[in-house]
Amino acid sequence: MKETDPTNQLKRIKKVSAPPFLFTRIEAKIEAREKNRLPISWAFGGSLALGILLCLNIFLIINSSEPNHQNNQINSVADALELNTSNQLYYE
Amino acid sequence: MPPSNQSFRLLYEQYSDLVFNLCLNYLQNEADAEEVTQDVFLKVYQNIDHFRDDSSLKTWIYRIGINKCLDFLKAKKRRKRFGILLPLFSGPTSETLKAGSDFRHPGIQLEDQEALQQLFKHINDLPEKQKSALILKAIDGLSQKEIAGILKTTEKAVESLLSRARKNLQKKIDQSEGKN
């Protein structure tokens, strides 16, 4: 006779025990992960170094956008001596 | 903080058979089930701090097991999709892929092997939630309340999932018998 509920067949599946070696493998995996994990002090040191580098870059970018004082002083001296500061050699 | 070796061993002894059988029923391959069981306990070890008392430990472990099985099946599908290209780059891996996809369930007796392999073929074609509900109910014998807790849904929704799963399964069986 045909079974009405197709899932009835699934009741014939027996429970099995997990293989005995599985726990040792899990322990080995855990150990391997722990070994590969970066120490907190290293991670902290790395991020601190990156932070300093970033701050230094920002500082340099901000400073380079300010007008150059040394060039201004040279220009004022050239003006006082009535020197030509342009690259044009011939006047029309 | 991860659990101590002693407490983790106790936890493993209590739930290893449950997880291994769940993986077996989900993946229908002994080697795959062993691999996923390891991943489940690794996840349990790493995330035991995140376990909250609003669900039981058994429910939480079941949930991790189902998610790991689904992830494994998705990864397997992805590998199969690129299976044609695999031998070009790495020869031996394609063989291990084939070996892992055989139907090998130690809980099924030899005389039921063929019929249940056919049935599992149809179960594997069901939507994820229907498949999960069906396995948890028909094989693990869980109550609708327990299944609702694992699948994070209501008992009514589980009832509807199971009813649709049975209907779809019957339809697939009828179709395959009609073809033969």
Image (cartoon, rainbow, N blue to C red):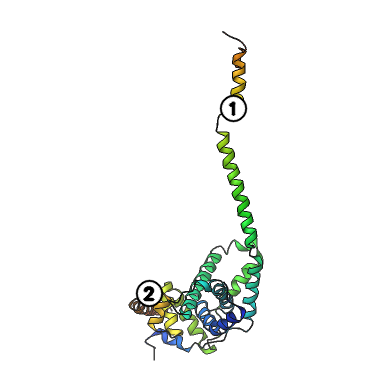
Where residue A92 sits: x, y (%)? 56, 8
Name the subunit of mark 1.
A
Where residue B175 sits: x, y (%)? 39, 77
Name the subunit of mark 2.
B
In the image, B25: left or right of A53? left
Residue farthest along the top direction in this orientation: A92
Give B46 or B116, whichever is nearer the viewer.
Answer: B46
In the image, A21: left or right of B117? right
Q: Which residue is mark 2?
A: B153
Q: Which residue is mark 1?
A: A69
Res B34 label: none
Q: Is residue B93 visible?
A: yes
In the image, B153: left or right of A64? left
Q: Is residue B163 above or below residue B72?
A: below
Real-space CA distance between mark 2 and mark 1, rounded to the nearest whole angstrom: 71 Å
Residue at 52%, 78% in the rendered image:
B23
For the C terminus of chain B, the image quarter is bottom left
Type of amino acid at the residue the image marks with label 2: Thr
Give B153 or A51, whichever is nearer the viewer.
Answer: A51
Residue A37 sits in which quadrant? bottom right
Q: Nearer the viewer, mark 2 or mark 1?
A: 1
Same chain for marks 2 and 1? no
Residue at 61%, 63% in the rendered image:
B86
Where residue A58 sits: x, y (%)? 56, 42
Residue at 51%, 68% in the rendered image:
B74
Dot 2, crowdedness within 10 Å: few (<14), some or many (≥20)? few
Q: Is residue B92 above or below residue A85?
A: below
